[in-house]
Amino acid sequence: MRNLDELFAALVKSNFRRGFHLRGADKAYLADKGLPLILQHAQDMIAKRLAPAHIPNDGKQTPFRGHPVFVAQHATATCCRGCLEKWHRIPAGKLLNEQECDYILRVLEQWLVGEARSTTSTNENRPDRQSDLFS
């Protein structure tokens, strides 16, 4: 696993990874549901879609939109076991342990918080929306 500062510095250098941002329905969903609930969804997705040692559709299991976590996974290269191995140094072919699942959740959280902050900066006249993101 990588240091998060080192990871995010590398991700920003990737044209593909830095092109992902929350838009439209995904942005609204994060604002409406709040970060804590979205992170609960992320935990469930990690357990079901990334944690198993062998994933039959690995590399294709994460849609590009439809939930803020899906977008975050592509932005942070936590979308499949191949990307986890390449970007995060988490070997494929083995069940993810609790520490690795927690690491992935922290990566997703850091990206989502950054997106939420950039979202709230565009909603400065709506303080009710800013506070809802983190509750």
Image (cartoon, rainbow, N blue to C red):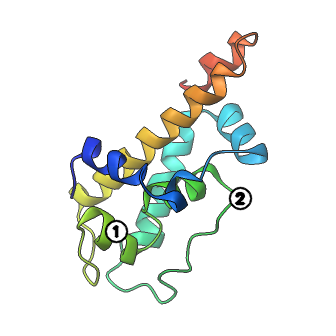
How crowded is the residue under tag 2: few (<14 C-alpha within 10 Å), some, or many (20+)? Answer: few
Residue 84's disc number: 1
**Residue 47 lies in quadrant:** bottom left
Asked if 108 appears above or below 52 in the picture, the reply is above
Residue drawn at 71 percent across, 33 percent down: 32
Q: Earlier in the sequence, mark 1 or mark 2?
A: 2
Q: Name the spot of residue 48 as percent of width and height, x first.
A: 46, 70
Q: CA distance from mark 1 to mark 2?
A: 21 Å
Locate residue 132: give its quadrant.
top right
Q: In the picture provided, is 37 more to the left or to the right than 107?
A: right
Along the viewing direction, whichever of 46 and 122 lies nearer the viewer: 122
- Around disc 1, counting alpha carbons within 10 Å, would you say few (fewer than 14), some (14 to 19), or many (20 or more)? some
**Residue farthest to the bottom?**
56
> Which residue is disc 2 drawn over?
66
Figure quadrant of the N terminus: bottom left
Q: Amino acid at mark 2?
A: Gly
Residue ID at (54%, 62%): 16
**Residue flagged by tag 1: what amino acid is it?**
Leu
Assign a secondary structure to mark 2. Answer: loop
Residue at 47% in and 83% down? 58
Residue nearer the viewer, 108 or 122: 122
Most foreground residue, 89 or 35: 89
Q: Position of residue 104 (x, y in %)?
A: 35, 55
From what the image shows, is residue 56 above or below residue 127?
below
